[in-house]
Amino acid sequence: MAEDGKGKVLRSGWTTGACATAAAKAACSALLGGGFPDPVEIALPGGQTPAFALALAETGPGWARAAVVKDAGDDPDVTHGAMIIATIRHGQAGAGLLFRAGPGVGTVTRPGLPLAVGEAAINPVPRRLMGEALAVLAGSHGVACDFELEIAVPGGEDLALRTWNPRLGILGGISILGTTGVVIPYSCSAWIHSIQRGIDVARACGVTHVAGCVGSTSEKAVRRARGLGEEAIVDMGDFAGGMLKYLRRHPVPRVTIAGGFAKMCKLAKGEMDLHSSRSQVDMEWLARQLGQLGADEALVAAAARANTALQVLDLAGTLPLGQSVARQAEAAARAVLDNGDIGLDVLVVDRQGRVIGDSARSG
């Protein structure tokens, strides 16, 4: 049961894959003459059997269509409120169930994803859920599960611009996702999944140097400093540990971690989750770094009393504090990466995107 940090219980929701399964089951029932069940119940991998109200129910010569509006619960999901539409037709005998990308659902254009290039961006678990639901219906009507199933999401092309799909080479819309069918509010699982898929795509495209970036400012800085293209960028966010652990098992020759001063201070201290609610900058540790760089006692004491890491950075003046943090962040990250075959370095930037620390730089 998820909570918001203040004791309030957060409401779970349903993935696009669960919604697509419900819409597909309702449409198939109508196509086979059984009418539209409303609500329509489906079975999820964890044993849950949620029921979904239909937002659309239409039939025509040789086809049927149903839709479900996605409810992501209390998770800030970009697809919350999106309509997931399934249109089904009879297919060729023996062809099995064929998936099509309708308007607003993306198409895979790069290798490295769990779907072949050219396939509709409907992930394997949702495909399995839909296949199982339709096979049961077809069997109950004495027919083979030979259907063409199109999944569409009105406005999905615009929604996809707020996801990682364009960077992963999924073009034209969103992906139909979900391994459990359930959205756990603020679970961060979707972000970790996207980090992993970003690394997979980079490896499949032959990229030998990837950069894990905290945000857009550090991304711009590392692309300038390292001459990297968009395909090399992994939106690491606050999940340095999650990225490094995945790279340990799925290596590339070189990795750069890029982030702002405060986040990289946390990494230097050994924190692998850089979110402000889950880790804090150790001001006394940061003050000691100034002392080791030659700051006098008054400056060290002022740094220890500072409210923010940026205040300490201002106090440092010309002392190479950013460079010191970059080197220690590299050492902490290398301990987690635990793979001597991977070249690793850390880039520290200020709020204006200027590089103030580069562990790959000598001196």
Image (tube, rainbow, N blue to C red):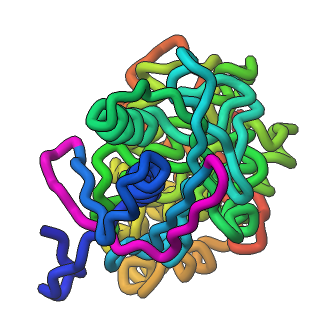
Q: Nearer the viewer, residue 125 or 12?
A: 125
**Residue 8, horizontal then vertical, whole percent:** 16, 87
Question: Is 140 situated above or below 187?
Answer: above
**Residue 212, horizontal then vertical, whole percent:** 60, 44
Question: Is 137 situated above or below 239?
Answer: above
Part of the protein shown in magenta = 45-62
User: For residue 208, which quarter of the picture?
Assistant: top right
Q: Is residue 279 visible?
A: no
Q: Main secondary structure of the magenta part?
A: loop
Q: Nearer the viewer, residue 229 or 127?
A: 127
**Is residue 46 shown in magenta?**
yes
| Residue ID at (43%, 23%) | 248
| Residue ID at (49%, 50%) | 31
**Residue 286, horizontal then vertical, whole percent:** 42, 65
Question: Is 83 situated above or below 115?
Answer: below
Q: Is residue 60 visible?
A: yes
User: For residue 46, which quarter of the picture?
Assistant: top left
User: For residue 334, which quarter of the picture?
Assistant: top left
Quarter in which the C terminus is drawn: top right
**Residue 166, horizontal then vertical, whole percent:** 74, 50
